[in-house]
Amino acid sequence: MLQNLRLRAAAIPPPLAGFMMVVLASALFASMHSTIRFVTVSEGIHPFEAAFFRNLFGLLVFIPFLLRNGFGMFRTKRLGMHLGRAGLNTVSMLSWFFALSLIPVADATALSLLGPVFVALLAILFLGERVGPRRWIGIGLALAGGLIIIRPGFAEIGLGPILILMSALIVSCSKLMAKVLSGTESAATIVALLTCLMVPTTLVPALFFWQTPTLEQLAMLALIGVFGTVGHLLFVQAYKLADMSLVEPALFTRMIWAALIGFVLFSEFPDMWTWIGGAVIVVGTTYIARREAVRGVKKVPVAQAPVGD
């Protein structure tokens, strides 16, 4: 599938091809999140078990890539950091999946757009990156968008939004670790080890809430894994073809897809404040990406997967 997309993209200008890939990946992630909400709310599958099957079926989709690139990609001298990153991603994914069982997909998607802001803030704190006033403006805008969505003091902040923000913060730490690992490890090694390690790390918590799925439920869980893995690979390819400052606005289509699918499946539609806050977040993160492009900040493609995915 990805090979065919690359061949077709060859006739399209790379920036436009990258933008289109993000739009398609956004549709896949919105479909995955809606399926997660359906199996956890309507089918009674625990979110932790759904997370395990997302990784299991995602690994099965990933196997052709592993076979094509060989098992040499698993060689590493930094296994401890890979294990730590898998642990962080597991906690982030479990928080994200549990949140999707509590709040509408579009609301969760809007808050998850804050991910790049957490990455920027953590890079300032732990990697010593220097930030000028213009990047601070972008960070401030995005944080203001998050406050518009949750409206502290005007609306009750439930467990769902808290879990989404926690997931975004934790996965941002994982992305910084990927950035550090990229100094000595190949992108293939970083992706392959994370993909394989997250199967056992999500299995352990799933066993405490295990419910043997029916064939229909298993088919939906398989779709979650396929949507997530293909969407992730599309994101990686998109960031190879186009600059982040061009691709970043396309992330807002995740909200549009999530709202449309959520309305059809659950009769849920985000309120005005969610749309306004999501738009402000995208403006802020796009401004951050543009400033980093001007400064020539190196990006790590493997670290660009959305929160919890």
Image: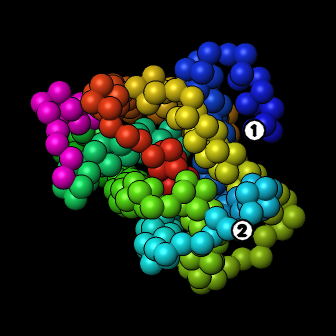
Q: Nearer the viewer, residue 101 or 258?
A: 258
User: Label 1 neighbourhood size at 10 Å, few (<14), some (14-19), many (20+)?
Assistant: few
Residue at which label 2 appears = 71
Amino acid carrying label 1: it is Leu
**Which segment did they paint magenta?**
128-142
Which color scheme does this rendered protein use? rainbow
Q: Quadrant of the N terminus?
A: top right
Amino acid carrying label 2: it is Phe
User: Label 2 neighbourhood size at 10 Å, few (<14), some (14-19), many (20+)?
Assistant: few
Q: Nearer the viewer, residue 43 or 110?
A: 110
Q: Residue at x 17, y 39 (%)?
A: 131
> Would residue 109 be found to the left or right of residue 232 on screen?
left
Q: How many marks?
A: 2
**Image vertical order of residue 170 relative to residue 283, above or below:** below
**Which element type, helix, strand or loop, lies under badge 1?**
helix
Is residue 49 among what the camera can see? no
Whole-Å distance between the Cαs marked 2 and 1? Answer: 21 Å
Q: Is residue 53 magenta?
A: no
**Which element type, helix, strand or loop, lies under badge 2?**
helix
**Image vertical order of residue 17 relative to residue 1, above or below:** above
Q: Residue at x 57, y 29 (%)?
A: 241
Q: Quadrant of residue 204?
A: bottom right
Q: Is residue 135 magenta?
A: yes
Is residue 147 among what the camera can see? yes
Report the disc number at residue 2. 1
Q: Main secondary structure of the magenta part?
A: helix
Report the disc number at residue 21. none
